Image (cartoon, rainbow, N blue to C red):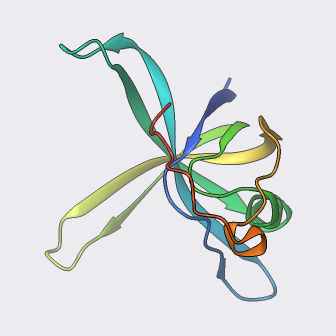
Amino acid sequence: MNHVSLIGRLVRPVELQEVGHGSVVCNNTLAVRNAKKNENGQALADFIPLVFWDKTALLLRDYCAKGNQIGVTGRMVSRSYVNKNEQTVYIVELLVEDLYFMEAKKISNQATNTNPEPIEMPF
């Protein structure tokens, strides 16, 4: 069985890439709260690479931004490639199948002419 469900915050701005034949992809990272804390008592996070395709990527672009809390379900996939140093690099990432909005869409600061509020990361 390969089924993963996570809730966390987007680490990077949402950027789509076109990959031919009308498909789009978005690669991002989800900061997921860890039960452990550091020596200062601050919560730690695990950073999970995510891949969104087509409709899910478009939903992410239209309704989410860096720092937004989202829920995702999907399956873990692995791939590898040979880099310019002829070393094999292995990548494990979550292929997102379902996206869940955990908070209301934020109105852009440009539209409201207000100063941006700082985003605390990861939580």
Residue 33 spot, x, y in % from top left:
48, 24
Res. 73 visible in picture: no
Res. 80 visible in picture: yes
In percent of the image, x 83 and y 60: which residue is there?
A: 59
16 to the left or right of 90: right
Residue 120 spot, x, y in % from top left:
47, 40
In percent of the image, x 34 and y 53: which residue is there?
A: 90
Q: Which of 107 and 76 is in front in this view?
A: 107
Q: In which quarter of the image is residue 57?
A: bottom right
Residue 115 spot, x, y in % from top left:
58, 63
Q: For the N terminus, which image quadrant?
A: top right
Q: Which of 115 and 64 is in front in this view?
A: 115
6 to the left or right of 80: right
75 to the left or right of 10: right
In this picture, is 18 found above or below 62? Answer: below
Residue furthest to the left: 85
Residue furthest to the front: 114
In percent of the image, x 57 and y 40: which residue is there?
A: 9
Q: How many labels does the image show?
A: 0
Q: Which of 115 and 86 is in front in this view?
A: 115
Residue 42 spot, x, y in % from top left:
32, 19
Q: Quadrant of residue 101?
A: top right
Q: Nearer the viewer, residue 73 or 83?
A: 73
Q: Quadrant of residue 74?
A: top right
